[in-house]
Amino acid sequence: MLKELFVFVLGLPILLAFVYDTGQSALADRSLSVLEELIEGPLFGSNLVLYFDPSLDVDFVNNFVTLKVFRYISLIHVDLGSNGSIWSQKQPLEVLRGSYYIHIIICDTDITPFFESVSLEWNPKYILIYSLNADLIWILQEKVFQGIERLAYMSLLPSSLNTTNIRIGLYTYFPFFKENSLSLLGVWNKDSYANVENIFIDRYQSFEGAVFHLGTWFDDFPYLYQSKTEPEGIGEGVEVEMLDAIAATLNFSYTLTTEPPDLKWGAFVNGTWTGMLGMVHRKDKNFTINYFVITSERVKAFDATVSYWMEGFGMSMMSPPPLPKWRGTYYSFRSDVWLGIAVTYILIVLLMTIQDKIQEKPFFGKRTSKWVYFVQALVNQGMTKLPRAQWQRVFIGWWLLYCFIVTIAYTANLIAFLTIPVFPERVQTVQQLAESDYG
Ligand SMILES: *[C@@H]1O[C@H](CO)[C@@H](O)[C@H](O)[C@H]1NC(C)=O
Ligand SMILES: *[C@@H]1O[C@H](CO)[C@@H](O)[C@H](O)[C@H]1NC(C)=O
Ligand SMILES: *[C@@H]1O[C@H](CO)[C@@H](O)[C@H](O)[C@H]1NC(C)=O
Ligand SMILES: *[C@@H]1O[C@H](CO)[C@@H](O)[C@H](O)[C@H]1NC(C)=O
Ligand SMILES: *[C@@H]1O[C@H](CO)[C@@H](O)[C@H](O)[C@H]1NC(C)=O
């Protein structure tokens, strides 16, 4: 009797553990096949960022990451046990925000601490949370996921827990629907979810009459200014008209601010944002609609609409008078060309002097100047006398050819300069303007 009781007491936990374990592994197997269908099906071809909860079963993770489908997909693995702040600082913007990557979070415990610490730039368009723990659905309502446009959650349907056919539900959360905001969209089945848009529903189709508070400044004619006919605090302008149109479609209303407390537009000073952008950054206000120049600093910290106005800046100044024509006489060549000609001329005279020294009968007598002799060809005059030695003649021949080219080039340039007026170099860049003597 005692022995039987002993066996029973000993056996019960083993039996319970077995039941629990088969339940868990059935869920893990089903989850694995659902994830595979998902990635092979609607998500195929997308780039993925996969976040893994460190408390997940090691075998499950191993079986998952070795799925065949991952051979064809560009993947980024993230350990949710690591420091989100450090991770996000190392990622390029296309990983952190936008729709280039689809983010899949696989978890069975609360993983919000990681996302609470990621940088403000983290704002993907698509996030799918796959939970192996059906009680984790409240995670959808967490603040860290509030700004995510397309957020989906998948986990076991509680009603199928003890059945042989485990079913996985697809949920989302509509922050602005007062009732029933955690919604079951359907039960997973690969045929009814054929593309990404079926899984990821737009959560912000309607704001259900919500009121937004805008950090604005009535100092932006013609975009936003104090209405002349309406009482103080009622704004008017292009932006108000756009906002009204959007508000009517998306069902929300709004309040405006006449001016920011510090009368600034919004810049990043001493580590904090000032002005209207500061109000939004501190979350005193929900958003702003004023006319902002898009800078890289602002784009990093805030999401902006597409730009609706392009502005250009121009500067003009009087064009200077053309240079006097006589300057064409030396403008035909650049100064380095002039220098080159002078150096060649000196060199040729020196060479000739040396040549004459080693000649038995020097060609140049005492009375003929070599300087005058060689300049003749340069000014387009023929050479009356030629040396008798053949090699000296060849030498002079090369000099004549050189002079021929130089004089023709000079003549052609001179004609061009005399026909077309030449202007001094104009200011082309801001740098040149700063260096010029214009007041
Ligand atoms: C993560 O790293 C940052 C420094 O980049 C540090 O300030 C923060 O305390 C870390 N968080 C955790 C949870 O370790
Ligand atoms: C599943 O089985 C467990 C233990 O047998 C039971 O406590 C639980 O209520 C059952 N759940 C459902 C949804 O039937
Ligand atoms: C806007 O939302 C409110 C609250 O849900 C609702 O009562 C109202 O009918 C909606 N208006 C429109 C035009 O849909
Ligand atoms: C920024 O900090 C410096 C030094 O602490 C201070 O002099 C300056 O006034 C601050 N600027 C603003 C806008 O607070
Ligand atoms: C809008 O801003 C107010 C604070 O001014 C805040 O209480 C509210 O939660 C914000 N609304 C949304 C939808 O973020």
Image (spheres, rainbow, N blue to C red):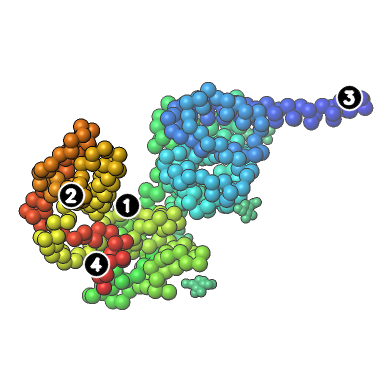
Please tell me the numbered disc located at residue 306. Answer: 1
> How far, Cα to Cα, is label 3 from label 1?
76 Å
> How far, Cα to Cα, is label 2 from label 1?
83 Å
Q: Residue at x 26, y 42 (%)?
A: 356
Label 4 residue SS: loop
Kindly check if marks 4 and 3 are in contact, taking CB atoms under 8 A apart as contact: no
Q: Is residue 112 visible?
A: no
Q: Earlier in the sequence, mark 4 or mark 3?
A: 3
As drawn, 158 above or below 406: above
Label 2 residue SS: loop
> How far, Cα to Cα, is label 4 from label 3?
90 Å
Q: Which residue is mark 3?
A: 4
Residue 24 placed where, x, y %?
65, 30
Q: Earlier in the sequence, mark 2 or mark 1?
A: 1
Label 1 residue SS: loop
Residue 96 placed where, x, y %?
48, 45
Front position among marks 2 and 3: 2
Front position among marks 2 and 1: 2
Q: Residue at x 39, y 74 (%)?
A: 263
Q: Amino acid at mark 2?
A: Thr
Count of picture labels: 4
Q: Earlier in the sequence, mark 2 or mark 3?
A: 3
Q: Is mark 1 within 8 Å of ligand 5?
A: no
Q: Which residue is mark 4?
A: 222
Quadrant location, the C terminus: bottom left
Q: Is residue 327 visible?
A: yes
Label 3 residue SS: helix
Q: Is residue 78 left or right of residue 421?
A: right
Residue 157 placed where, x, y %?
55, 35
Please tell me the numbered disc located at residue 368. Answer: 2
